[in-house]
Image (spheres, rainbow, N blue to C red):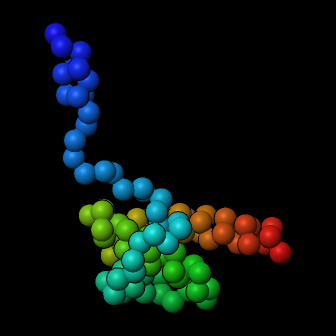
Amino acid sequence: MDSKRLSTNAIPTGPPVPDPDRWKSCQVAASPLAEQIVTRVWGRAPDLEWQVLAIVLIAQRLEDHAPTPTTAADPLAAELKALIDEAFHTLNRAANSTT
């Protein structure tokens, strides 16, 4: 068999897989629907940075066709809140270490 032919056939095709953590660096555009979901599920957060992280996480999940929580009682809401809290605390630690 021709080794050149094998190597080119082994190259994967298809769209690139988006970075699953792109929301943490706000590389996702917020959308009105994402804002509505965040407000419905978590209300208005007292900290704007937390609110922004929540919105971009939900916006990313909408882009990726991943499930989003429907109410505060949705088990997914607690799971995503934990991710948002972790990212929020990481950002605050990084900000506090530079001051």
Which quadrant would residue 94 be assigned to in this image? bottom right
The C terminus: image quadrant: bottom right
Residue at coordinates 66% horizontally, 69% vertically from top-left?
Answer: 91
Which quadrant would residue 28 be assigned to in this image? bottom left
Which quadrant would residue 72 be assigned to in this image? bottom left
Q: Is residue 41 visible?
A: no
Residue at coordinates 35% horizontally, 83% vertically from top-left?
Answer: 31
Q: Is residue 2 visible?
A: yes
Side of 57 relative to 33 (left or right): right
User: From the viewer's perspective, is residue 70 above or below residue 3?
Assistant: below
Q: Residue 34 appears at what percent x and percent y? A: 36, 80
Q: Residue 42 appears at what percent x and percent y? A: 47, 81
In this orientation, which residue lies closer to the viewer: 6 or 24? Answer: 6
User: From the viewer's perspective, is residue 8 above or below residue 66?
Assistant: above
Residue at coordinates 80% horizontally, 70% vertically from top-left?
Answer: 98
Side of 15 relative to 76 (left or right): left
Side of 17 relative to 13 (left or right): right
Q: Residue 33 appears at what percent x and percent y? A: 31, 83
Residue at coordinates 53% horizontally, 68% vertically from top-left?
Answer: 25
Side of 76 relative to 97 (left or right): left
Q: Residue lying at the far top in this picture: please name it.
A: 1
The N terminus: image quadrant: top left
